[in-house]
Amino acid sequence: MFIYLFALFMIAFGGVVTTAYAVHPHKARKVYCLLVFLMLALIAGLRGTHVGADTNVYVQTYRSIAHLSFNSSRYEKGYLLLLKNLYALTHSTDPRILLIVSSFFFVGMVSLFIYRYAKIPAVSFLLYIALQDYFNGMNTMRQQFAVSITILAMMILFSRKEEDTTWQRRYKLIIPALLIILARYFHSSALVMFIPYIMIIRGENAFSKGPVYAHDHVRKILGLAAFGFMIHSLVVKIVTMIIPVYATYINSVWGNANYFGSALNTAIPLTLLLFCSRILGDKPLNREEQNAMILCGFEIVFFVLSMRMEFWNRLAQYFSIYLYGLFVPNTLVKIPNDYDRWGMNTVIVIMAILSMLVVLLLRPEWTKVVPYTLGI
């Protein structure tokens, strides 16, 4: 666990130095995000094959990829095609190749998002680890490829502007949809991103009709979460009708409820959402804030549903980056007093780190990222 605490310390120390002493803030921000990316990608990429709940399974698949048939594998074709191309390029089944490439891709996409959108990158990177999204990249490789592709899709969708030409606006609608379809070939759960995709587009149309407030979104999120919890059985039936393969999850370990873990997972984003909505107060949301609240809302809804069936945790993973990489840091920066702002940043980060320690110390089997060892 020491290596994770060391990474947290270096991120915090670098964030303070970058903020307080940088002569050229934009250049310092770029260098800082690049160095954090390299550090986190190397830690994940050089890990041993036992670090991460499913790492060994993916390693064994890659070792046998030369003889693996697309039709005989339960994995999506996009993921298998990636492995076969990786093997064709390197002529090696050394699993370190897969771990390094995947880690650089996952961490790289998160780092790019934080660099582009987070107004306090240090807070975002600290929460990336402390809220355990970093560890998800070591646990669920196929899904993390899908998550990373959908992050790129959302970045393109976010880049839509009023002054864009008609062709540019159409391009920024079509490409994200195609990327979500591509992500589906790494993990079929990526199709869930079409729901916020449609809502963000509809939200942009509704945005011009009148102001939108944070408390309105909070009420909708809480209402949807409570309603989904009550009609959970119906929700499961609808999902399995649309995607029949998910019926296998009901009778698997993913069909069970993890009450302690789900409650903890729900409490953290819900607390942050309520706290940040208080900071926003009665001021109308801008488009970035509205989009962030839509995406954060889905994370909370799926975590609440996971109290009934643990499978929903997998869907929540698609939305966590928009909480720590967009909504929280960009809301905290609105606190006018410097001491209050940095005080709240510190409190939130410390509380998140404590929650991480609770999991890693008391429930290490959830992630299996401790103890950490190098795979070289």
Image (spheres, rainbow, N blue to C red):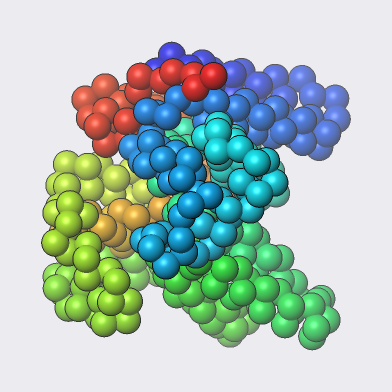
Against 74, residue 49 (above or below) is: above
Which quadrant, please, contains the C terminus? top right
Residue drawn at 24 percent across, 32 percent down: 365
Q: Residue 132: horizontal and vertical position, in percent?
A: 40, 37
Q: Is residue 275 visible?
A: no
Against 143, residue 358 (above or below) is: above
Most foreground residue, 282 or 187: 187
Image quadrant where residue 318 sits = bottom left
Residue drawn at 34 percent across, 66 percent down: 221
Q: Residue 143: horizontal and vertical position, in percent?
A: 44, 54
Image quadrant where residue 203 sits = bottom right
**Left or right, residue 311 beside residue 134:** left
Which quadrant, please, contains the N terminus? top left
Residue sitting farthest toward the right: 24
Q: Is residue 27 visible?
A: yes
Q: Residue 310: horizontal and vertical position, in percent?
A: 22, 54
Against 200, residue 297 (above or below) is: above
Most foreground residue, 269 or 257: 257
Most foreground residue, 205 or 141: 141
